Image (cartoon, rainbow, N blue to C red):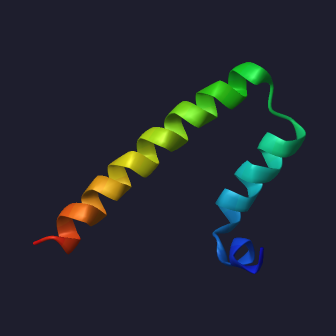
Amino acid sequence: MSDFHNLPKSVKKTVRYINQDASYNQLMMLKKYLKQAIERKEKELYKKNNL
């Protein structure tokens, strides 16, 4: 859990928001956008490491 404390403040706020206030629809929207962003970044890093 100590790795969590090293994350940016905005990420910690997002997780707190999900845990405390997010409705089901907001949760599904956040899940969609976070998944897309993570997948894009993984592809970018994979390409960079395999050059």
Residue sticking out furthest to the left: 51
Residue 10: x and y in percent read: 66, 59
Q: Is residue 36 left or right of residue 40?
A: right
Residue at (15%, 70%) from the top-left corner? Answer: 50
Q: Is residue 33 left or right of residue 23?
A: left
Residue at (74%, 76%) from the top-left corner? Answer: 5
Q: Is residue 3 above or below residue 31?
A: below
Q: In this view, does 51 lie to the left or right of 19?
A: left
Residue 1: x and y in percent read: 78, 73
Q: In this view, does 27 lie above or below 1?
A: above
- Label count reads 0
Front one among 7 and 47: 47
Residue 30 found in image quarter: top right
Residue sticking out furthest to the right: 20
Residue 11 found in image quarter: bottom right
Quarter of the image with the C terminus in it? bottom left
Residue at (71%, 19%) from the top-left corner? Answer: 25
Residue 19 found in image quarter: top right
Q: Is residue 7 left or right of residue 46?
A: right
Residue 39: x and y in percent read: 39, 47
Residue 27: x and y in percent read: 70, 30
